[in-house]
Image (cartoon, helix red, strand yellow):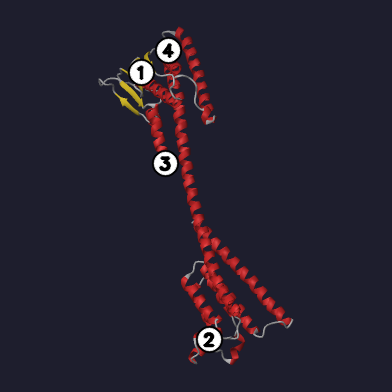
Amino acid sequence: MEAVQTNGTATTDRGRTRLVVLALVGAAYFGGLAVALRLEWYPQALPGYLYLGVVALVACATLHRWPVETLVVVTAFTAYTTLAPLPPALYGLYLGPPEALVPLAVVVFLTISGRGPVLATGATFVTLSVLVVLPWRDVAAAGVQGVPLSQVLLSDAGQDRSVVLGRLLACGIVVTVAVLLRRQREATTELARTNRELLVLRAGEVARISEHERTRIARDVHDEVGHHVAALVIRAQAALRVADDHPEQLAPAMRDIAAGGQDVLGRIRGVLRVLRAAPAEAAGTTSVVDELALMTGRLTSLGYEVESMVHLGDDLPTERRVTVLAVVREGLTNAMLHSSAHRVHVTLDDTSGATVVTVTDPGPARERFPDVPRGGAGIPSMRDRVRAAGGSLTTGPGPDGTGWRVRAELPATTVVAAASASSAGRAA
């Protein structure tokens, strides 16, 4: 509704502007004729110029609403006053070329440069211009008298041939300029439409990028903070369970919780620092072995037995290191929250070229702390990370059908680089 109202307002404004321009042009034209009459400096056929101005102004005023009818009426008026024998009472209407063609030229120019037909309008104007400008009556009379055409063309018809040629060229220029202006307007309209489409596409791209960034931030916060918060909750609930029977264990538990809280605060600040940093500064520098030691130490303090086997090279890329740690972190968090086992096995191996990450627990599955909020996006986030690295993720019971296993396999770095180069080549 707003678009319709806007278009209607724009059309009304253009109509008012058109009427104002016509009023100014008419005032200037008739004012000039009045001055010429006052100074007795005017052509012999002054009434013809008056009618010429009236016809031109009325035609411009009605052309937008009745284009075809206006063109027909002006064409008939021009043909009648220039080609037909006028009665003595209308001799004052006669104007020779090119003045007599001015109203039709204006109508033709506005019609072609606007949205009107091009071929029919241009053909009508060119045909009438040729009939008005060329001395065709003299040529026809000479032909009737049997004078050869070559002699007729060389004879002096009372008109300068250069003037005749100039008038014909002027009529052609009117049509040519109108066609060029029409094409320019069409190109401008098409460009504006394309710009609107590009704006829509850009808005969609911005929305997509924003959604991607929100997903990435949520994933980073989940990976960096969720594991530590879950450990804190488990430690706090464990301390509450033994508070009555073993109050002497509260102080060590509170110290562990305080230390864990400081670690979580540091992790949150690290995430914020990464979000504010440039891409080259976003990656951390902690090694896989050191980070794994921190995670296993955290679970060991909660009473878990963690076995880890690490066979990784020293040149692990930063993106792969982040993915490996995210898989391990999520696997350990799931073991804490969704398994009754107290033993977890972690394996990191890239001796075969591919990097394989495995986190298993013997189960059985049980929500150890039902009051801990659940329903997160840990596994989908982990799957997205692995897929982005070109790998695959499988989760489910172990090979013997018991417990739970998280296994991620990341292809060799050279394979990923080759696939990226191939995708870039296809895009180019």
**Structural distance between the alpha carbons of marks 3 and 4:** 51 Å
Q: Position of residue 194 (x, y in %)?
A: 48, 53
Marks 3 and 2 sit apart, C-alpha to C-alpha, by 71 Å
* Residue indicated by mark 1: 347
Dot 4, crowdedness within 10 Å: few (<14), some or many (≥20)? Answer: few
Q: Quadrant of the C terminus?
A: top left
Figure quadrant of residue 94: bottom right
Which label sits in the foreground, 4 or 1? Answer: 1
Three-letter code, disc 4: Ser
Give the distance between the C-alpha atoms of the residues marked 4 and 1, in whole angstroms: 20 Å
Tag shown at residue 151: 2
Q: Secondary structure at mark 1?
A: strand
Residue 9, located in which quarter of the rendered image?
bottom right
Q: Which numbered disc, 1 or 3, marks the residue that appears first in the sequence?
A: 1
Q: Are marks 2 and 4 in contact (CB under 8 Å)?
A: no
Which numbered disc covers residue 301? 4
Kindly check if marks 1 and 3 are in contact, taking CB atoms under 8 A apart as contact: no
